Image (cartoon, rainbow, N blue to C red):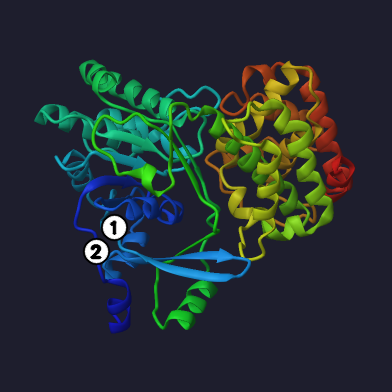
Amino acid sequence: MEAGLHDRLYRDPATAGGIVHLGLGAFFRAHGAIYVAEAGGWGITGVSLQSPGTRDRLKPQGWAYTAVELGPDGEKPQVATVLRDVLVAPEDPQAVLDAMAAPDTHIVSLTVTEKGYCHEPSTGRLNRDHPDIIHDLENPLPKSAPGFLVRALALRQAAGLPPFTVLCCDNLPENGRVVQGVVTELARLIDPALADWTLANGAFPSTMVDRIVPAATPADLDRLEAATGTRDEAPVMHEPFRQWVIEDRFCGPRPAFEKVGVQMVADVTPYEHMKLRMLNGTHSSLAYLGYLAGHQTIADTMADPVFADFVRGLWRDEIIPALTPPPGEDLGAYADALAARYANPAIRHRTWQIAMDGSQKLPQRILGTIAESRAAGRAVPGLTLAVAAWMRYVSGRDEKGAAIEVKDPLAPRLAALWRDDPAQTVAGFLALAEVFPPALRDDAGFAADLTTALSGLVRDGARAMVARRAG
């Protein structure tokens, strides 16, 4: 390890415990970990559930890393030293369980993406046919995030310790309720008494998280090294904006989040609907349509006036009418702020990155708005076009016939649904109970609108279809 790296990064490593975080990706290190560091007095043990890459990059740096704020006026780095260790679950699952079951662990937080909860997005129920869940039912050393939660809670119960608070930080509607349901359903299959104990004594607060965190590139690492004189192999890049709303329902100690800008509230639901539908819903819409139109990043997409007009129309005409504003929030002003964030040229958030795992994301980001709007008699042509663009995207071929690297747990099934006849393609997709709720699967009018949108995409291309809906 270079001396400069030791001097500049390995300065004040966290010694306190308190939090184990499952899924130590860039987002949490640029968002939740920064809040925890600012609150003081707590340390985080990170857990990688799949690969050792993050651990291997952070360990030579004493678990420290640089968080770089990317603003229109330049870059602002800060060193984060809140991590105390990083474990790799496939290498030593027992070590992960021991950390979660330790007496000084009071919170287990998660950013494992929507697919990491092994649930059915359309229903929120545990997917009992998921290979990792099948494994975790038969083996005491788990693979899945729900499996680790259940087995660690069992160890705490056996040791006479209270449960930890489970703090989900992923983009799921009512994420605390979803995770509670998945965990207690799995626990009940293993030990009904454990499920009852968890429900009676545990806590699963819902949260809303918001910060755009593009993937760091080799060029980012080189530029940071040139600016600071230090090589950091694990920096995170993020926009200036951040928001964290947490339901104030913990079963043990917690950091003083309210002192560092976290909104501690009684009900997160209106905040999460606002963010999931206004930010994540339009992010996904721009990702699929923008990618098909040849735009590599959200900023590039927003620089195209046709897309900028389109997304403003989505907010004004289709999304905001389906929302109840959170207390004190102006949804029009929130949309204006989102537009400015999307257009930030310093944030190179790739449309391909946002397009990942669409089968898991669309139900809460877009399909919920469509279903509620159609039930209320409101037209949603722009969001319907976005769903059609997802179908076109997961076919695996772009508008020029080039291959698309589709990252989705259902990727082979989705690609196999593509037909030359758009109506047949739509019928195949709408039969996916894991994705589409019954209200849309059984809606002949929605199927017809989706077929029209998909036909237009195939015939005229994404930009031309967006131009018709813009304004």
Query: Which label was assigned to residue 203?
Result: none
Kindly report the distance in space between the C-alpha atoms of the residues bearing marks 1 and 2: 7 Å
Quadrant into which the C terminus falls:
top right
Mark 2 Cα within 10 Å, few/some/many (few <14, many 20+)?
Answer: some
Query: Which label was assigned to residue 83?
Result: 1
Image coordinates for residue 208, horizontal then vertical, percent = 49, 38
Residue type, label 2: Pro
Quadrant into which the N terminus falls:
bottom left
Tell how many labels.
2
Instruction: Give the vertical position of 271 relative to 232 (above or below).
Output: above
Residue type, label 1: Leu
Image coordinates for residue 116, horizontal then vertical, percent = 43, 39
Mark 1 Cα within 10 Å, few/some/many (few <14, many 20+)?
Answer: many
Q: Is residue 458 left or right of residue 33?
A: right
Q: Is residue 404 visible?
A: no
Label 2: which residue? 13
